[in-house]
Image (cartoon, coloured by chain):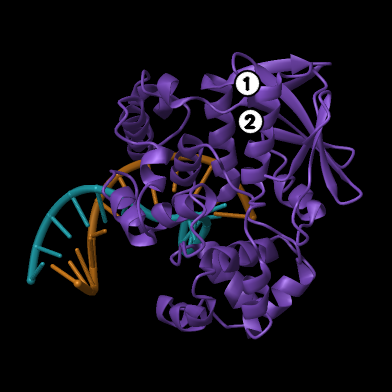
Chain colours: A purple, B cyan, C orange
Amino acid sequence: MNWVDHETYIEIIPPKEFNFNECLIFLGRSDQEILYRMKEDAIYTIIKGRESFILCRISYDKDVLKIEFPNGVPTVVEREKIGEYIWEWFDLERDLAEFYRIASKDTVLRKLTERYHGLRIIGIPDLFEAFVWAIIGQQINLTFAYTLKKRFVEQYGEVLTFEDETYWAFPTFEKIATIHVEELKALQFSTRKAEYIIGIAKLMNNGDLSKEFLMEKQNYQDIKDSLISIRGIGAWTADYVMMKCLHQPSAFPIADVGIHQALKHLLKLEKKPSIEEIEKLAVQWKGWQAYATFYLWRSLYDETI
DNA sequence: ATCCAGGAACTGT
DNA sequence: ACAGTTCATGGA
């Protein structure tokens, strides 16, 4: 992490290919989002400190990310931890030079990387949150997915109120490991999804599953194999989590209907491409499938492309 | 009403 | 290993 601690606030110096406006667009994509809010070109969210939650205001000026703490300044250890979280959240460690080199020679990606230059994968650093969001999103429309997420967070998450605004933190696996399937069904989760989510919370609570455990693995396939062995996690969810949480650049949720839609639109196809057709296109994306996917998703909420 | 949505497990071959 | 079926629930 490249940062400067100013004690009452911190600054994060992102790599050169970074577009903060794209972060604002991505994070503002649903008005049902509950884990962060946008105000005056800044992002407000709460991040867990040693004991309490710390309200963070993230803004961008003169090529630097500025993180302020409207609700009180955290300790130096917490400030560094918050910096690391944001560094990871916006995938600032990644050097995009090779991706852009590949993209410049690719008919699909060239347009996207020109248009969204500096867009980075906005991740989900918390493993449990990544699992839950992926499972919620299985086979339902995104609008309903956000509704379910909002209910879940409001029911089991922690809340912080500051100056008449309410900020929510995602529920912990410790908490969800103690609830029952019927409770989630009451929030209109399907029986299956309720079982999957509580099952994963229990695995994590027992220490049988953690981000550290997964990150220790040597390669993409090892991680994917161990993810798929978990009930409720198929190929799509495994790749989604590897892309959004585990920073695997080769992660590629190829069955994703969003990818299919984006390609159909970009290539002006009559119908959505088959998996085989996508595999053919994606040969050139090798090593950067996760970024290709994220840029394709980005094009879905762009009317002008 | 009908199709579909950022799928996965289950069943049968 | 592969294909077809079932589950599940709201959005458009």
- Quarter of the image where the N terminus of chain A is located: top right
Residue under mark 2: which chain is it in? A
Residue under mark 1: which chain is it in? A
Query: Residue A99, percent across and down?
Result: 62, 72
Within 10 Å of the Cα at label 2, are there few (<14), some (14-19), or many (20+) other Cα atoms? some
Q: In this orientation, which residue lies closer to the viewer: A119 or A12?
A: A12
Q: In this orientation, which residue lies closer to the viewer: A274 or A74?
A: A74
Q: In this orientation, which residue lies closer to the viewer: A200 or A209?
A: A209
> Along the horizontal axis of the image, is A105 left or right of A223?
right
Residue marked by disc 1: A49
- The residue at 52%/68% (across/down) is A289
Query: Residue A57, percent across and down?
Result: 80, 31
Residue marked by disc 2: A81
**For residue A123, above or below residue A103:** above
- Quarter of the image where the C terminus of chain A is located: bottom right
Q: Say if residue A167 shows up in the picture.
A: no
Going from the N terminus, do you reach mark 1 or mark 2 first? 1
- The residue at 67%/52% (across/down) is A92
Q: CA distance from mark 1 to mark 2?
A: 8 Å
> Along the horizontal axis of the image, is A191 left or right of A116?
left
Tag 1: amino acid: Gly
**For residue A162, above or below residue A151:** above
Cβ atoms under marks 1 and 2 closer than 8 Å: yes
Q: Are marks 1 and 2 on the same chain?
A: yes
- The residue at 61%/45% (across/down) is A88
- The residue at 65%/86% (across/down) is A105
Query: Residue A227, percent across and down?
Result: 33, 49
Q: Say if residue A3 shows up in the picture.
A: yes
Query: Residue A136, percent across and down?
Result: 47, 42
Tag 2: amino acid: Lys
